[in-house]
Amino acid sequence: MLDLLIKNIKHLATPVGNFPKSGKEHGKILEIENAAIAIENGIISYVGSMENAPACKNFIDASENLVTPGLVDSHTHLVFGGWRQHEMELKLNNVPYLDILKAGDGILSTVSKTREATFMELYIKALIIAKDMLSHGTTSFEIKSGYGLDLDTEVKQLNVIKRLQKSFNEDIVATFMGAHAVPNEYKGKNEEYIDFVIEKVLPHVKENNLAEFCDIFCETGVFDVDLSEKLLKAARKLGFKLKIHADEINPIGGGELAGKLGTHSAEHLIAATDEGIKLMADSGTVAILLPATSFYLDKPYARARKMLDENMSVAIASDFNPGSSPSFNLQFCMNLACLKYKLTPQEALTAVTLNAAAAILKEKEIGSLEVGKKADIVIWDCPDLNFLFYRYGNNQAKHVIKKGVLQ
Ligand code: NIG
Ligand code: FE
């Protein structure tokens, strides 16, 4: 028996397939007028024209609405203590992001707050935000650790993520990012800190199955290319899938390393070089671009069009964190993707659904409206796809459905 029929859909838009789209394929999505979607046991059982739709007495009429897959946020730092509103004054005085970190503030001030916070404080704070994300259409997301930088606090953060995975009906993917900054205890001893992470933290995270991916901040004054390579190789040996924060501020070789190692994704890439883009395209690395971070740090926007021209797969995410991107609103990132990256609405939709799902290895289950995939669906307060990308700042999600359940 059918659970729910979404009927008379004015405009249905979805990428199609179980694999990330690259290059020109980003823009080739399925768009149907007067469509329907049927849901059975949380899974999509019909997508197509209204004419051929099965009957069901439970229905939602979407005759004035755009319907798309649920949004997937493939890069967040959702679990953290405190906020960083005191940095506003520094920003207004043009103090650069990396200088704030160098002075022991920035990420390190969030580390202090996260160490101080109890498990329950972190969990409740993250849960409230996750619910807000859901109401904005984000039905699945990734969360990185990296505000502990010691064994206990990294494990505390990862356990919060685990609890969120259990208690929340979302698909949540955990990334271990113990190499997010050098903690004060290891100031000036970057290699010793990486060795500590490799020897003491990574094996514990693996044994307790606390994360699927391992990530590192490859950046001037944080971890250089050699240390990034050392950590990522050790993580791969233990069975982690790899991610890298690369070329966010300075092009020190992070994109090139991602290509050389064939990391699953490379994230930020604001300053990625031509060579880095070529190598990543060859290795099939997914580019996760974070336009809200460019906006908030007042930095250039990543060269998304160049990446598509080189046949890369591009995903777009919020980078939600208390420093460089204090907003989880993926809809705003979609506006920026069109206005700043110059992606078409079709390309940008693929980047926040199917390709974002692929960026966290979930493309077989979510990311498109197709029979057999989870019924993660957004019914928008919009008549068509252009409208969704044209208005900004307000929450345009009207109804959000996660695994077949209306939220
Ligand atoms: O992706 N760049 C490193 N990590 C985050 C920022 C974290 C923070 O400032 O708290 C990012 O931008
Ligand atoms: Fe980040």
Image: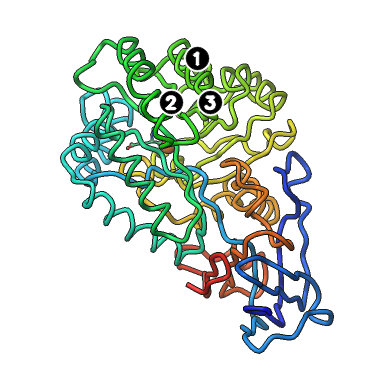
Is 72 placed left or right of 27 in the picture? Answer: left
* Label 3 SS: loop
- The label on residue 301 is none
Q: Residues within 10 Å of mark 2 (few under 14, many from 20)?
A: many
Query: Residue pushed farthest right?
Result: 52
Which residue corresponds to mark 3?
239
Distance of label 1 from label 2 (alpha carbons)? 9 Å
Is 219 placed left or right of 376 in the picture? Answer: left
Which residue shows up at 60% across the image and 73% down it?
Answer: 382
First in residue order: circle 1 vs circle 3: 1
Residue 108, quarter of the rendered image = top left
Q: Is mark 1 within 8 Å of ligand 1?
A: no
Task: Compare residues 380 and 147 and report the one nearer the observer.
Answer: 147
* Label 1 SS: helix
Q: Residues within 10 Å of mark 1 (few under 14, many from 20)?
A: many
Foreground label between 1 and 3: 3
Height in image: 393 above or below 155? below
Q: Position of residue 150 (x, y in %)?
A: 26, 27
Foreground label between 3 and 2: 3
Which residue corresponds to mark 2?
216
Distance of label 1 from label 3 (alpha carbons)? 15 Å
First in residue order: circle 1 vs circle 2: 2
Q: Position of residue 3 (x, y in %)?
A: 62, 78
**Ligand 2 positioned in quadrant:** top left
- Residue kind at label 3, given as amino acid type: Gly
- Residue kind at label 2, given as amino acid type: Ile
Q: Position of residue 227 (x, y in %)?
A: 43, 13
- Residue kind at label 1, given as amino acid type: Glu
Which residue corresponds to mark 1?
229
Task: Compare residues 321 and 402 and report the one nearer the observer.
Answer: 402
